[in-house]
Image (cartoon, rainbow, N blue to C red):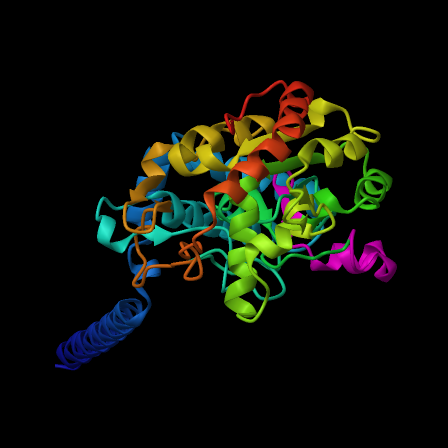
């Protein structure tokens, strides 16, 4: 009888222990299910940029022709070289930054075919008021990279298409640019190089820092000052028919100061003799050969690229191809990024995938030019012709302005 009770007690004890274990496993299972559904709910509530992350990464690899894994490894190598792998958990942080860069490239390079949602990009940017140029749908990577002095500068010319060129170039993942015009080498040089450098966005190794200030081209001191910063600077000049450029320049001023004198009265020192007033900035800027002579005292021609403002409108992909080659970058920006807006008469960037709202620039563009006396226009063409011919010879390019 004593043996029987002992067996019964042992059996009862093992059964109770088993039940406790099963109950504990059941509670743990419920806890994991709860955590899973909590995380799932959080992911659904996050922005669509995160929700479509994997899809965008896959599409980015298809668009750019570079695998994401390859991009990740290259970026990790760059970041490791900069940081020296001294911080704990650095590899994980760098990998996270790579994913952000990969997705940024996807969101900017993937383009829809719906022209109604296109991005209209022209010379002026109402969004670039100060500070750094914020790329649409860009992820915050301010903690990575370092600020550097620009290796490439768009130095001119006003009303030539510099804003459009800069915004087109910002599509490229290896270009980081300042949005507002720094005017360092013409207005703020006394603030020092560190002040200028602090205006620049952070970049990783292999990325190019850029800025654009169109007035540099006509500022006599700018060439020497940029040369003092770096002899290797790559300079880009966007040029346009000087007569059309002058009228566009006047039109912009007229929109701000409606009471200014007529275009004709500003053009001539004496209308009767037909003597052109070259002291008027709208006229002076278009004498490209004169300004170029100053730059060639410091920089060889192979460090200066001339972009046609007319071709930037008629064939933006072609001009952007030349610029990318000049900067030593892969041709990522191609004709698939553009469509032509017939109403405004300007090329536009198609809407990047994943955006909820078109990023439109250039509301001040496409202004209707005032009617200018054809005789005045012809006088200007005659005035600019010898300067244009000299400019063609100096650059080895015929821009077709005559």
Closer to us: 60 or 223: 223
- Residue 194 lies in quadrant: bottom right
The image shows residue 37, relative to residue 183, as above or below, that is below
Number of numbered discs overlaid on the protein picture? 0
In the image, taking residue 62 as reference, residue 159 lies left or right, namely: right
Name the one closer to the observer, 335 or 125: 125
Q: Residue 17, position in %: x, y?
A: 24, 76
Asked if residue 207 is among those painted magenta in the image, a careful observer would answer yes
Please tell me whether residue 68 is drawn above or below residue 8 in the rendered image: above
96 left or right of 273?
A: left
Q: Is residue 324 left or right of residue 199?
A: left
> Is residue 299 located in the magenta-colored stretch of the structure?
no
Question: Can I make out residue 65 in this image?
Answer: yes
Q: Residue 105 in the image: x percent, y percent? A: 43, 45
Q: For residue 205, which quarter of the picture? A: top right
The N terminus sits in image quarter: bottom left
Image side of residue 200 versus residue 124, left or right: right
Residue drawn at point x = 84 percent, y = 46 percent: 221
Q: Position of residue 229 (x, y in %)?
A: 83, 42
Measured as percent of width and height from the top left, residue 120 is found at 37, 52
Front-lying residue, 50 or 269: 269
Q: Image height check: is 122 above or below 339?
A: below
Is residue 67 visible in the rendered image? The answer is no
Q: Residue at x 44, y 54 (%)?
A: 369
Which residue is farthest front? 272
- Magenta region, residue range: 185-214
Residue depicted at 20% across the width and 72% down the height? 22
């Amino acid at each position: 009888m004593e043996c029987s009770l002992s067996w019964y007690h042992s059996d009862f004890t093992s059964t109770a222990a088993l039940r406790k274990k099963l109950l504990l496993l059941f509670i743990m299972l419920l806890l994991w299910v709860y955590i899973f559904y909590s995380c799932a709910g959080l992911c659904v509530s996050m922005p669509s940029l995160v929700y479509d992350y994997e899809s965008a990464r896959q599409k980015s690899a298809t668009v750019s022709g570079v695998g994401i894994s390859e991009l990740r490894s290259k970026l990790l190598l760059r970041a490791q070289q900069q940081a020296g792998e001294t911080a704990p958990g650095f590899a994980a942080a760098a990998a996270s930054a790579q994913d952000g860069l990969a997705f940024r490239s996807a969101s900017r390079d993937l383009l829809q075919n719906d022209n109604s949602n296109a991005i209209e990009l022209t010379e002026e940017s109402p969004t670039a008021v100060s500070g750094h140029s914020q790329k649409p749908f860009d992820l915050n990577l301010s903690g990575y990279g370092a600020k550097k002095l620009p290796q490439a500068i768009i130095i001119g010319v006003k009303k030539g298409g510099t804003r459009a060129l800069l915004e087109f170039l910002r599509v490229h993942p290896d270009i980081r640019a300042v949005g507002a015009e720094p005017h360092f080498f013409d207005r703020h040089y006394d603030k020092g190089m560190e002040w200028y450098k602090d205006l620049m966005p952070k970049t990783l190794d292999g990325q190019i820092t850029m800025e654009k200030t169109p007035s540099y081209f006509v500022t006599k001191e700018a060439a020497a000052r940029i040369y003092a910063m770096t002899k290797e600077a790559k300079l880009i000049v966007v040029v346009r028919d000087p007569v059309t450029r002058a009228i566009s320049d006047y039109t912009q001023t007229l929109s701000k100061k409606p009471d200014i004198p007529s275009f004709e009265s500003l053009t001539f020192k004496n209308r009767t003799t037909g003597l052109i007033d070259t002291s008027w900035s709208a006229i002076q800027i278009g004498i490209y050969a004169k300004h170029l002579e100053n730059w060639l005292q410091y920089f060889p021609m192979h460090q200066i690229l001339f972009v046609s403002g007319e071709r930037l409108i008629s064939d933006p992909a072609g001009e952007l191809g030349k610029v990318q080659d000049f900067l030593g970058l892969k041709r990522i920006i191609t004709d698939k990024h553009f469509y032509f807006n017939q109403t405004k008469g300007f090329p536009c960037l198609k809407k990047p995938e994943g955006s909820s709202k078109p990023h439109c620039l250039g509301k001040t563009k496409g202004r209707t030019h005032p009617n200018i006396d054809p005789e005045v226009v012809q006088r200007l063409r005659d005035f600019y012709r010898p300067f244009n011919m000299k400019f063609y010879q100096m650059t080895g390019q015929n821009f077709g302005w005559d």
